Image (cartoon, rainbow, N blue to C red):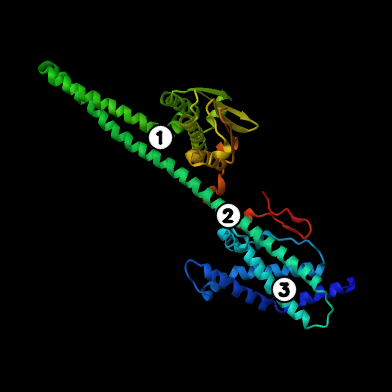
Amino acid sequence: MTEENKPKVRAKIVEIIEKNRTKILDRYYDDYCGYASSIDHKKRNVEELKSIYGPVKIRFSVILDRFISILRNGKKNYDLSKSEQDVGYALRFVVPASRRESHSHDITRTTSGFYRTVTSLVLKELNKTRLSANKEYILELMNKLIYLTIEDLWICSVVGFRFQQSVIQNLLVRLMMTQEKERQKLWSEIHDEFLQILAVIPLKLEIIEELSKKDVLAMKRELSFTKNIAKRTIKEIRELGHGFNLYWVERRGFLFSIKRFIKIFEQRFGMIVALDVNTNVKEIREIKGFAGITLFRIIQEALYNAGKHSKATHVKVTISVVNKNFTVTIEDNGLGFDENEVKLKSRRLLSVGFAFMKERATILNGSLHINSMENKGTRIDVSIPLESFSKRAVFPNNLEKVVKPQEYIGTKYTYNAEVKFKNCHKP
């Protein structure tokens, strides 16, 4: 095929697609909804799915527009504006392949189905014309449609995943805040109950005083009973106090809470904990509110992990401020572990603890890194921006914020048939 004939072929393909756009989209849409109906757990029929899968049809019409633009202009690049994205559409393609076979993945099925629909019609219509066209060249042009479709679906999958991640983070923040409120509420109720029990002790002491003058044996029984009440109450308060540290952080401050918890930790696990604070009192006082409690929970979980799993004798906690970041390092001289094996059943509980710590750090717009080697101990580094502790701090999605897909997509996506992806999405 001559070079001067190629523009004519491209123009003819454009003409065929534009003339048969409705037929192409209807035919593909019928096939798509038929496939969706066959795997739909709600057993809805094709007509019912057609009424709710409208965005899919619109999406593929946009893909045709981009393909036409490439054929007309002979350019390999196009811009995809963020306003064209649709989260509902994107989520339809965030589906793993069944049986781990690539051909069963929705993106593979969708791309191949759309390509076959368009290509078969184009070839059929071109055969009716007198235009001299090399089939190999036509298929080369149509192959760009495969890339366009895969790229579009891939981008939408990224949008879908980011949207889902934002929803999960939103729920986690709500869960943590609700958890802390409930802990405080429960502690208040228990506190009142213990006060009532403790109020009985002075009355018992008066009875004991009277019995001491009349019946020594009865006095001893009453004294033993009163002692048991006091011991049992003290024990229960101590045990419950380990979990209700919100009171400490809010009323007595972050540093007091850490020191108090370290004392309890040393008594419980028999380890020596060295606390090294390399920052001034003013910066420490800023560590409060939801962010302060969340950071406290990270340190608490890290120490508990060391106590339960490491078999260490010494733990060091270092608190400092570096480059406008509040940093905490927790390191022990314990057994350590192979990070690649932490997901094994025997390590599953430890892995879950690390996952929660990382999620808490992420919610505070910070980071958490774990370094460990077998028989060489474990080191956990936490870094949280100081601004996360200010009253104006905004955590992921600000809790009440409505998530919009545009916020998770870059302004431009560049298509290039030779170089593949460029600036596919913003990190």
* Residue at x 47%, y 68% (from the top left corner): 42
Residue 301 in sight here: yes
- Looking at the rendered structure, the secondary structure element under dot 3 is helix
Mark in front: 3 vs 1: 3
Number of other residues with Cα within 10 Å of mark 3, as a class: few under 14, some 14 to 19, many 20 or more: many
Which is nearer the N-term, disc 3 or disc 1?
3
Between the residue at mark 1 and the residue at mark 2, the CA separation in whole angstroms equals 34 Å
Q: Position of residue 348 (x, y in %)?
A: 49, 41
For the image shown, how many numbered marks are present on the structure?
A: 3
Disc 1 residue type (three-letter): Phe
- Residue on which the image places disc 1: 244
- Dividing the picture into quadrants, the one containing residue 421 is bottom right
Between the residue at mark 2 and the residue at mark 3, the CA separation in whole angstroms equals 34 Å
- Dividing the picture into quadrants, the one containing residue 83 is bottom right
Residue 382 in sight here: no
- The answer to whether residue 21 is left or right of residue 241 is right
- Residue on which the image places disc 2: 163
